[in-house]
Image: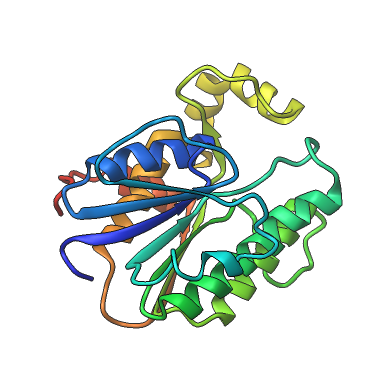
Amino acid sequence: MASAIKLVLVGATGMVGGYALRYALEHPNVELVTSIGRRKVGISHPKLTEVLHPDFADCSALAVVLKGQSAAIFCLGAYTGVVTDAELRKVTVDFAVEFARMLRASSPDAEFSFLSGNGADPTGMSRMTFARYKGEAEKAIREAEFPRIYIFRPAYIYPIEPRKEPNLGYRFLHSIYPLFRALFPNQVIRADDLARTMVDVAVKGGSEPQVFVFENRDLRAMANAPHSPGE
């Protein structure tokens, strides 16, 4: 990976994506950030190019935008119980796979980072819908044969800034977070730590074709390791 990269970020209006965008813009080894999403991110920066794309079911219009990119981080997602099952699968699987297809065609040397989730099951055997859909997306992205693929599987992502929690499960975990973190430290990660780790991994890159899967324990260790943004 070159010392100064061109990074694509999908889903920068979301919780993790928002932190990733801000961190990437300040990273000394990121030359340009192209944010692609359905809504404006609401910030301006000399490194930032913003592209509005309303329907990720068809990413053909992004072919030119995606040329010459070094890496992409895909953070777009939906919450169980907030959307219908059909919409959940469309966002989780179809949108990710379609974007990966177009990125692979436009920038065949680009690396791909995918925000998956704890328990993602590529075998399709899980009883949890979310786990099956994330696993299905992971499997399809692997088959796209990017030079390097990074799959991130966080457990409970703690929001640093106040927000309206998307479902009952998140509301419950947020209410007991201090206790839950003390009892199960490897089942939680701060949203900003996760975002920073994803950007650092994308920037660092590598030379050998490989698929990396980072579970929540790995993400916490990476986030807590001493580092500097230029590493």
Q: Is residue 226 left or right of residue 113?
A: left
Q: Where is residue 141, by image quadrant?
A: bottom right
Question: Is residue 18 or residue 216 the one in the foreground?
Answer: 18
Question: How far across and how far down the image is residue 151, in percent?
Answer: 49, 62
Question: How far across and how far down the image is residue 102, in percent?
Answer: 54, 72
Q: Is residue 193 left or right of residue 146?
A: left
Q: Give the color scheme: rainbow, by chain, secondary structure or one colour.
A: rainbow
Q: Is residue 137 visible?
A: yes
In the rendered image, the quadrant that contains the C terminus is: bottom left
Question: How far across and how far down the image is residue 169, in percent?
Answer: 72, 30
* Residue at x-position 77% and y-position 61%: 126
Q: Is residue 121 visible?
A: no
Question: How far across and how far down the image is residue 70, in percent?
Answer: 32, 68
In the rendered image, the quadrant that contains the N terminus is: bottom left
Q: Is residue 158 above or below residue 96?
A: above
Question: Is residue 39 or residue 224 the one in the foreground?
Answer: 39
* Residue at x-position 69% and y-position 29%: 166
Report the number of discs.
Answer: 0
* Residue at x-position 63% and y-position 68%: 97
Question: Is residue 29 or residue 165 the one in the foreground?
Answer: 29
Q: Is residue 74 above or below residue 15?
A: below
* Residue at x-position 37% and y-position 82%: 209
